[in-house]
Amino acid sequence: MKPQLLSDRIATQPALRWTLWLLTSAWLLGPALANPDLVGRAQDWAYFNQHTTSAWLSWTVYGELPQWETFACGGLPAIGNLQGSPVGLTQLMTAVFGLLAGQRLTWWLFVLAGLEGMWRYARRHGVTGVGGLAAAVLFATSGRFVQLFHDGQPAFLSFELTPWALLLLERGWRDTRATLAGGLVMALLFLEGGAVPTPLVAVLLGFVTLLRTARALWRRGAPGELPWWRPVATLALMASVALGLTLWRVLPVVESLALWPRTWLGDDVYTVGHVLNMLLRRGPHQGYTADGSSLVGMGAAMLFTLAVLARDKRAVWPLMMTVACVDLATGLSDGLGLFRVVKALPVLHNLRAPFRFSVFAGLYIALGAGVGVALVERRLAAEIERQAGGKQARRRARLVAAGVATLLAAGPSAQLLHFGHSRLSKVFVREAPRVVVRPFRQSIGNRWVADVWPAQHRGSLSCFEEQPFPQAPGLRADLPQEEFLDLPDAGTVTRLSWSPHRIELQVKLRRAARVLVNQNHHRAWTSNVGHVLRHGGRVEPGPDGGRVGEGLLAVALPAGEHRLVLRYRDPLILAGLAVSGLTLLWLGLWAWRRRR
């Protein structure tokens, strides 16, 4: 009979466990929490904060769903931009707690979710006691999450939800409730992380499903074995729920990708040694794939190796998955070739930056390290109990075993936390721009400090995007007014009110003319009078030889006095919201009926 671990009785107490999670996450994120008005210097800090600030202005200042981003590139689809997260958890938190405070609270929530999710995932795989706690800390505070702050990409902290996605997928093989909850997790991950975490986590879930299906086919007919089709059906249902809940974002994203595809021509090749250095070796910061950029540490690897050498059955699964994830992280290099297979699949042919699969390798190394710690604690407790009889001796054995396991796990965990905290202490050095609400104007801007312009209520025409969103040649900075006529002597245009999605103008025309708005045209703009179109000319040449108004949002109006109202309403988003609302209603009714 296996002895009950003292540490497992402690770890399963929510108050004690969550106290550990709060202390661990607060220490890791201490430099960010202690400097709420500072951000990093990396260019991606400015890029992502530009989008976050733009969406925050739409939500809080104007009370509008951020469908259109006026402040970047002359205007582009906000929800249709896969790189942004205008409707994710971060944006909701900023709307409630403020721009900078909301971001930091979201980071804290994601780290807490990673700790709790990994602990639960470890327990599912038989890792109890101190081992489960160690696995959670080693994953949720690993170097890849710290690297995101160095790179200016905390928007991708939704990778912390990976253990939840795995846990609910595996539970869903026998429980439909878990499958539906897994769809909710994937929906949140897509709304928050967009282009980066979503496809990578989807690939991981697909690989786990493939292995579980193969096992079901191999052991077909064995007592208690799943039907061979159940893993695939579980993944399909999870994906369907996620799609139904996020269709209002999926549709505009699909449209923008079809019109302006993201093209990646990089040569993604890394050696196994390079990936292992990212995971196991601490080094100076030198970029995305530097030594230690996905650190879990040599201590964790040694504990994992101990479990493998001891032939603990619980180490088999993390060992298989570590090998697979390391191979995926090597990209197109020679090896098992898993990434080549992934790239050959529909939709995933343009998948980039395979080194990010190292975060999953770190997850399974952390799981394996937890197996090693749990193995030592259980065997030590059993050995002491065997040599000393009596109830008091058994209690002493469990206490000693828990103490030894704690010391064994504390070394790698403390080193990793210290490494992360010290690196984050060097990130927050630039003061975040102060937000000023004033009449909107287009400016030349600067992509290197892109977050300055929306904070000053200015659009930046200096554009940098992963997708080649079109910019109208006729866009101009620092015009006397943002709305004007193609024929200056035809009348007057006066702005009455302005928001990113609604512009109201008073137009007086002596003859027919076009009202031009100094923004990119998009099909979702509508007007209460006249005809919305993309302006193609009829404006005097500008100083650079181009047409001042070419490609701008325009409205053709007849002569007379008009109260012109322009609105941005995307039918794709409205249709998607209807489907997502029905999906949410169905989930609510299903849950209610199950409870009844």
Image (cartoon, helix red, strand yellow):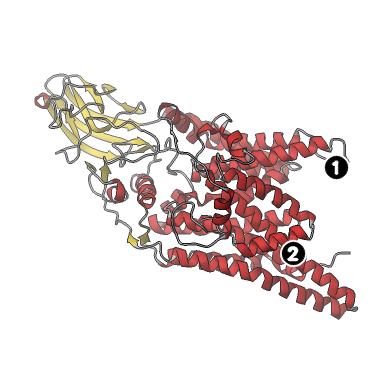
Which quadrant does the C terminus fall into?
top right
- Residue at x 80% of width, y 79% of height: 396
- Residue sitting at 30 percent across and 42 percent down? 71
Secondary structure of residue under mark 2 = helix
Residue 367 position (above or below residue 188): below
Is residue 36 shown left or right of residue 219? left
Give whichever of 262, 266 is nearer the camera: 266
> Going 80% across and 71% down the picture, which residue do you hit?
380
Viewer can see residue 154: yes
- The residue closer to the viewer here, 440 or 343, is 343
As measured in the structure, the alpha-carbon distance from the residue carrying label 1 to the one carrying label 2 is 27 Å
Q: Position of residue 127 (x, y in %)?
A: 73, 59
Q: Amino acid at mark 1?
A: Gly
Helix or strand or loop: what does disc 1 sit on?
A: loop
The mark found on residue 242 in the picture is none
Identify the residue under disc 1.
224
Q: Residues within 10 Å of mark 2 (few under 14, many from 20)?
A: many
- Nearest the viewer among 470 and 333 is 333
Q: Residue at 65% across / 45% down in the picture?
A: 324
Position of the N terminus, as image quadrant, is: bottom right
Residue most extreme to the left: 489
| Residue position marked by numbered label 2 in the rendering | 374
In the visual, does 89 lie left or right of 509?
Answer: right
Percent from the top left, x then y, of residue 543? 12, 32
Is residue 386 rendered to the left or right of residue 78? right
